[in-house]
Image (cartoon, rainbow, N blue to C red):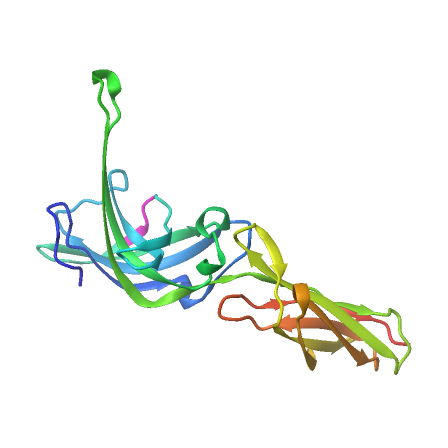
Amino acid sequence: MAPAASAATTPDLVFSNVTVDNGKAIVAGTTGTLRVPVTYTPTRPSGLTIDYKKTFAGVILYRGTLKSVQNTIEPDPTAPKCVTTTTTDTTVTQSCMETLFADPSDSLFEAADATTWKAAGSYSEIDTDLDDSDGHVSLDYHSDLWGPFGSGVRIKRAAKLTADASPEPVRKGRTITVTGKLTRADWATGTYSGYASQKATLQFRAKNSTGYTTVKTVTSGTGGALRTTTTATKDGYYRYVFAGTATTGAATAGGDYVDVR
């Protein structure tokens, strides 16, 4: 339930059934805007109008605590899509869907943002007087947060992975060297940086087959470098696969074809 009102302008709102991104982790690179779906059930007083011009309500993601919010990801300021499900003499309950916009350039700033975020219900009021013909302007802003809801939402850094097998072509029974590089998004610099000391699996898919099999596990070195050897037996594709970590998403390199003669 929503907490008791602490001021006359605080409405008695209740948010329930909050689901962010269908319960999946959010994986963000360094560019582009992620559209993250959120569904929730708000219950408001029947006399409260939320017009998304001066009054707003929805769900946000935040890092930190309600008292000391360290970062937020907020929804599109336009109205969410809502359907009224229940009405009483005093309340209105709806089923709503909104979209959060996660843009690394203005929402994710540092490695600490790769963690579990929390969801909160939000209500705000804006009252402005920008007519300065009388020598006076004003901006009055009021905001309330309720939460957290659910077990949290994991936000991860996107990873990239490459693979290069050589020599090409190669004689059967000779040694093939497979190199690669594991990198992940660095939100502070807007680039991808090497991810060292991480396990990646080398996989092989024979020509004209549909599935990859694991050859061995390799640990990334300085700058995320990967390097290992295997024996050439037949034509096919080699790739590296990274399963991801608590802070970083999974990645799969494109298969590199080797002609065995």
Q: How many marks?
A: 0
Point out residue 9 in the picture as x, y percentages from the top left corner: 14, 45
Instruction: From the viewer's perspective, tell me whether residue 130 is left or right of residue 47.
Output: right
Q: Which picture quadrant has residue 3? A: bottom left
Residue shown at 32% from the left, 51% from the top: 81
Residue shown at 71% from the left, 70% from the top: 226
For the N terminus, the image quarter is bottom left
The residue range painted magenta reads 78-82
Prevailing secondary structure of the magenta residues: loop
In the figure, 260 relative to 132: above or below? below
State the residue lying farthest toward the left.
89
Point out residue 22 in the picture as x, y percentages from the top left corner: 41, 65
In the figure, 142 relative to 204: above or below? above
In the image shown, does 88 or 54 lie closer to the viewer? 54
Point out residue 181 in the picture as x, y percentages from the top left corner: 69, 65
In the figure, 56 relative to 216: above or below? above
In the image shown, does 79 or 135 lie closer to the viewer? 135
Residue shown at 22% from the left, 22% from the top: 136
Point out residue 144 in the picture as x, y percentages from the top left corner: 22, 51
Q: Is residue 247 visible?
A: yes
For the C terminus, the image quarter is bottom right
